[in-house]
Image: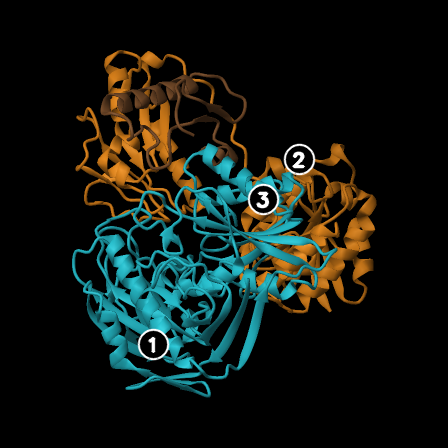
Amino acid sequence: MRLELAEFPVKTIRLGNRFRYDSGVLEVDQEELVTLALEDKRIENASVAVVAPGEKVRITGVRDIVEPRVKVQGRGQVFPGILGPVEPVGEGRTHRLSGMAVVAAVEYEGIIRAGNAVQRSAILDMWGPGAEMSRFASLVNLVLTLRLVKGLPEIEAHTAIQCSECKVARRLAEVTAGLEPQRVDTYDLSQEKPGLPRVVLIQGCLTDSHHPHSGVGYYGMSLRESLATVAHPNEYLDGAVTINATRGVGYSPTIWDWQNHPLIFGLYREHGRRLNFIGTILERIRFETSQGKELIAQNTAQLAGALRADGALVTWLGSGNAFVDVMLTVRACRGRGIKAVLVTYEHGGKDGTDFPLLYYVKEATAIVSTGTRDGWLELPEAEGVVGPYEQLQILSYPGAPVVPAGGPLSLDARDMVIGSVDNWGGQSWICRAY
Amino acid sequence: MLTIVHVINQFFAGFGGEDKADMPVGVSEGALGAARGLQAQLGEQAKVAATIYYGDNYFHGHPEEARDAILREVRFRKPQVVVVGPAFNAGRYGLSCVEICNAIANDLEIPCVTAMHPENPAVATYRDYHNLKIFLLPTTETAAGMSDALAALARFVSRLGSGVTIRSAREEGYLDRGIRRMERADRPGVERAIDMLLSDLRDEPFFTEVPLEIWDQVSPAPPLRGLSSATIAIVSTSGVVPWGNPDGFKTYRNTYWRKYSIASLKTMEPGQWEAVHGGYDVSFMNQNPRYGVPLDALRALEAGGIIGRIYPFFYVVPGNQGSPSVMRQIGQEIAADLKKDGVDGVLQVAT
Amino acid sequence: MYPLAEQVGASRIVKAVKIPHPCGDPTLPPELDAQVRRVIVETALKAIQTEVSRTTVFFPAMAMSG
């Protein structure tokens, strides 16, 4: 499987009446994008706006973020199983518009009241302390604001949002057809250098098996209580892994993160140099019994062993007791002689004085910290608000009070700011002990 | 030249061992006993203006007087830095060093540095204080490492006195105070992870970025006797609260608890309760709150005389991302409330 | 789901059904579900009458998934 990723960087986006890309400037046919979104009858209103880094603008209602990509050669199409049939992806050539993203900002009231499948949206400040903490604030963002028809159940809302954002993302990338990219990177694991350690990426995926969308989609289908499976890293690059598009949360990844997985890019960079990158294991976590947790840990380690891994980078997404599965996986790998380094965010509470992690095994002797997800934040007043919400419910419980979206905000955690928790080590955040 | 004060116990001041451990707080101008060693290491960097000493037993037997006397002397001398110890593996001495540092740092806002063996039990107390103005340096187990310890203390005194911002524990060589701060590293996490893995694969040493923590161990309560006359209470972190969530619990990171009456209830009826919790699928609990508050089962046992009575309230704090220190506090408060009302045994349901 | 409870040092732990429904099993008909709940509660009462010196997990005497 050999994939060429052709990059077309975007520095400026202009809303106009045609699609054109030239020297970093992307012109966008605003009306065509709106029409594209409104094709789905579950969407009753759509609009498009551009927000650039540094503008004192707060984007509200953020559910998901996608990088525009399109396949120009090779089997299948980006976002397989979502925009088109399930066809294998990850080879040929894919164009990407880098330096920008499509932000799905959606007005949606769900049916579920609480629990871990309740709809949630986040905010994104493009300036100030809120921007400093989010990896999405340095992108030029095309905000797709949608209003869904009332009374939609969560799975319908998810499908409507996900299809729209992916359609828009692909449509934007199509502007590069026939153009010369700024650079082309080749992703190919078929050649291995003998003598180098074999390293696998173990990606823990918290999924909720009870809900219509479990939280992680593979070719558009929810991962549920499945056992661990092997996925080729190139599949991620072509949008094969997606999320529950009704939930935008600071400590969860977006589609953009799956498309730009830092551990995949990092391991690819080292492939054939200091290690052999042998692939990824998608490990469903958050089993609800201890038997399930032990089982997935052993099963994952066994799969890594079957791939003849010498070492593993282990990471995860999610929160809470799913972390027990992750730690047990580290233990199971080491028990088989597979060295395992865990990449994870920390807790630490408001002042950094609480325990950093909620569960430990003594085999977890190698941990990389990607910073904290806790801590109070004070966000300043914005000069403008883009997105569906003029008011925000910043504490998440039934009956919580609302505050003006553009005003100063006191948040008790990073959950509300999309991209504010470095899940997979793409940035240089760390926690140090004092 | 910096002015410092050195606080040591009676033994290191040269007065004697256990036989002199009841000495009250005293002070000597300039450097006395081990403080002379410190002064030698400090050279021209700093002057030991006074040596304060105390008996180990005296300190623990008269904590208020000892602390006040020491604070008085330190306040009078106006040092820039206070050095306490080193205590090596002496637990009692180590603890008094930490207490003294904490008192001086809080009351007088003078930075303090102490030193002891990393396995001295007082290190846990030092970490629990989370006091940014006190620093604990590692030493050998016994006083055989005294000159190294004094050299390290002297270097740290200079560093503290120079006004430079003290960096992280690993960079500066002190034991951390259980405070973790988010900062920028020199490279992205992915690069650090790959380097760490490659070192591990080559069996080369490396530093983990998150050391393992040990939770404190709780001694089990003695077993309950006389179940048939006992009062049993239910505590639940499942998030089951009266419908409408009247006390405004959040679905995560709650900071308080409440108790709700079940006095007249035989069971938990769906529709009267809802589960406010963001960490699990609450649809089962909403349809059947008994899953989180098994009142029906307990009522049957009460009716059958197996248990004496059910306490007329159940306690709630919805879990999910609860801060351990907050939950510890909540646990203590609930325990106090239970004791006050004569509850004998508790069933805690956790999701 | 008791590894966490063990780690924080809970002295007496009763292994219940599943995270979203610890004291019961919604896949069972109501009478059996109530019986599961009863057995779990009885196990808990047995646990608090048992002398333990360290973290101890008690398993209800019945077949439960996981």
Q: Circle 3 marks a residue in which chain?
A: A
Discs 3/2, front: 3
Query: Could you tell me how far apart the alpha carbons at marks 3 and 1 are, in whole angstroms?
Result: 42 Å
Q: Which residue is mark 1?
A: A57
> Chain A in the picture: what colour?
cyan
Q: Residues within 10 Å of mark 2 (few under 14, many from 20)?
A: many
Name the residue that disc number 2 marks. B57
Query: To which quarter of the image does residue A176 belong?
Result: bottom left
Q: Position of residue A5 (x, y in %)?
A: 51, 72
Outermost bottom residue: A23
- The kind of residue on which mark 3 rests is Val
Q: CA distance from mark 2 to mark 1?
A: 63 Å
Left or right, residue C19 beside residue B64: left
Frontmost residue, B250 versus B247:
B250
Q: Are marks 2 and 1 in contact (CB under 8 Å)?
A: no
- The reply to whether residue B191 is in sight is yes
Q: Estimate the x, y position of residue A168 in percent, counting from the top left.
A: 33, 72
Q: Nearer the viewer, residue C16 or A291?
A: A291
Give the chain letter for orange: B
Q: Secondary structure at mark 2?
A: helix
How far from the left and from the top, in percent, is residue B49? 72, 60
Q: Chain of mark 1?
A: A
Mark linked to residue A330: 3
Instruction: Look at label 2 and name its amino acid.
Output: Asn
Looking at the picture, does residue B97 appear above or below residue B135? above
Is disc 1 placed on a helix, strand or loop? strand
Please tell me which residue is depicted at 80% across the width and 48% down the height of the picture. B146
Q: Residue at x 45, y 18 (%)?
A: B223
Point out the image quarter for the N terminus of chain A.
Answer: bottom right
